[in-house]
Amino acid sequence: MIKASAILQNVIDTLFPARCAACREPVGKHGALCSACWQNIHFIADPVCCKCGLPFEYHIGISALCGRCMEHKPVYTQARAVLKYDETSKGQVLAFKYHDKTQLAPVFGEWLARIAGDYATKAQAIIPVPLHYSRLMRRRYNQAALLAHALGKHINLPVLPDTLQRTRKTPPQSGLSRRQRIDNMRAAFQVTPSKRALLKGKCVILVDDVMTTGATLDACSRALHDAGVPDVYVLTIARTVIAD
Ligand SMILES: [Zn+2]
Ligand SMILES: [Zn+2]
């Protein structure tokens, strides 16, 4: 017997044919990418810096650190990203962030789950990087929270969206040097006081869309450490590869 849900899915597929989640070209399956988009995507693969996930050209050992991490050790335990932040991924990430292309969330969630590896068993919760409420009002959704929920579905961990708060509105980070970004972000986050007890002693996965210098993620990790979180594992969709 054919299930009612299968019939309904057939009706949906006929009425709304599947389109590429990035460019809207017709594809065989809902939530998939077309072959042209696949070909232009650059996934990050080993070898990478064991701390921040920066790709290396050569294998120099599994505990090798990049120059930046040696100079200034990040506060988070480890960070990994799915894609290099290049022209292709930039278009997708910006469309997801600013232009309501939220249909990319399930694809991104699946990719984040794939790179999560043992973070899925080491962590007890997923926390998205928060937007300041005034930006949230303008954009209507927090892209990091959408990613966190999409990831949570795959790795069966609870998402705690209101755990981190921005304590003040920070100027946009683009155009700032690494040093300026760190200063800009210092003490910009805190754990919501009512959530501190809940977090104490728990390891978490911190989710954002893009990692550039890592200043935002470090500031969030510091706030989480202050609330008693021993390990923060960072997952992002993309990361810059050339130091800025
Ligand atoms: Zn496409
Ligand atoms: Zn590094």
Image: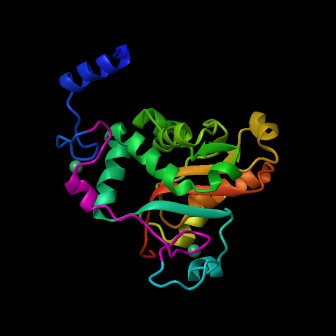
Q: Position of residue 51 (x, y in %)?
A: 62, 70
Let me know if residue 57 appears in the view. yes
Location of the N terminus by quadrant is top left
At 82% from the left and 38% from the top, the residue drawn is 197
The answer to if 14 sits in the magenta stretch is no
Q: Position of residue 17 (x, y in %)?
A: 20, 31
At 68% from the left and 50% from the top, the residue drawn is 121
The kind of secondary structure the magenta stretch mainly shows is: loop
Nearer to me, 58 or 28: 28
Q: Position of residue 111 (x, y in %)?
A: 44, 51
Vertical relation: 55 (above or below) 162: below
Colour convention = rainbow
Nearer to me, 76 or 222: 76
Q: Position of residue 91 (x, y in %)?
A: 29, 54
The answer to if 52 sits in the magenta stretch is yes
Location of the C terminus by quadrant is bottom left
Vertical relation: 111 (above or below) 29: below
Let me know if residue 188 appears in the view. no
**Magenta span of residues:** 29-55
Q: Quadrant of residue 128?
A: top right
Residue most extreme to the front = 1
Q: Quadrant of residue 19?
A: top left
57 horizontally vs 122: left or right: left
